[in-house]
Image: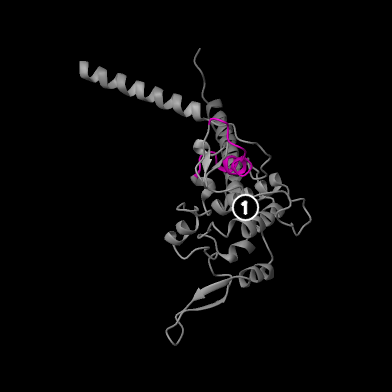
Amino acid sequence: MKNLSKIFFLIILLSGISFTAQTAEKVEYLKTDWSFKGLFGKFDRASLQRGYQVYTEVCSSCHSMKYLSYRNLAEKGGPEFSLEQAKAIAASFEVKDGPNADGEMFTRPGKLSDKFVMPYENVKAAQAANGGAYPPDMSVLVKARGGGVDYIYSLLQGYEDPPADVSLDDGVYYNKYMYGNKIKMSNQLSDGLVEYSDGTNATVEQMSKDVTTFLMWAAEPHLEARHKMGFKAIVYLIILTTLVYFSMKKIWSRVETKI
């Protein structure tokens, strides 16, 4: 019994330490108005298309999106590029294919059915090109990081000079929203870095929001369909509850109560 009490006390103590540590490390992320949040949330098509542009022109040289195919860009619920636009986007990339009749590999223009082209041949090549760090795949990055979209959005804008008491190794940068505040990826965004095809002003804040929206869609491509299904389920339950209530009321109205 005495041992059991000690074990119970130890569990309580460790839980308290863990809770305190998590509270101390909690960071207040930047906030913005996400169109896809809430029961009726939907993706902003223009933002998704701009986000894809930022990913292609800024992020894709290091980060892969191995679970996406070019055909997804034209599917309902996503950026919804036209089929011709999606075909043109796919054809702008060279895809390694084969072997051919001579047993050799060859390159060809991409097709809608192709996965997004990988920036590196393999993990070792990616690490060698990035000082030993492996740029994570972005397909489900929003779901893989605590804080989700708010974390990614804040991280992209969180670069600043380190405090006087913080020393950084070569190739390491200070980011106030990064876990531990140290990150090997340099600041990739600056005002006017890309020229949006729709004329939107490409500020760091705007590009951060657009590419994060695109990453959210990549991680949850069926979000809008799920929201619609959830709304229908709620309406159905309300109707069912109402019918059950009036049915029970009618049934019990026939029962005489004894005084």
Q: How are the colours assigned in the image?
A: one colour
Image quarter of residue 71: bottom right
Relative height, residue 30 to residue 156 (above, below): above
Residue tagged 1 = 214
Determine the residue positioned at 62% across, 43% down.
Answer: 153
Horizontal side of 76 relative to 179 (left or right) equals right
Determine the residue positioned at 74% across, 52% down.
Answer: 192
Front one among 70 and 135? 135
Relative height, residue 83 to residue 54 (above, below): below
- The dominant secondary structure in magenta is loop
| Label 1 environment density (alpha carbons within 10 Å; few <14, some 14–19, many ≥20) | many
Front one among 163 and 52? 163
Horizontal side of 43 relative to 221 (left or right) equals right
Q: Taking the image as drawn, is residue 44 in sight?
A: yes
User: Can you say which quadrant of the picture contains the N terminus?
Assistant: top left
Relative height, residue 127 to residue 32 (above, below): below
Can residue 150 be found in the magenta stretch?
yes
Give the structural element (helix, strand or loop) at label 1: helix
Image quarter of residue 110: bottom right
Specify the farthest residue to the top: 259
Determine the residue positioned at 30% across, 21% down.
Answer: 10
- The x, y position of residue 75, in whole percent, is 62, 62
Can residue 19 be found in the magenta stretch?
no
Determine the residue positioned at 56% across, 26% down.
Answer: 253
- The x, y position of residue 69, in whole percent, is 55, 64
Badge 1 amino acid: Phe
> What span is colored magenta in the figure?
145-165
Front one among 16 and 254? 16
- The x, y position of residue 5, in whole percent, is 26, 17
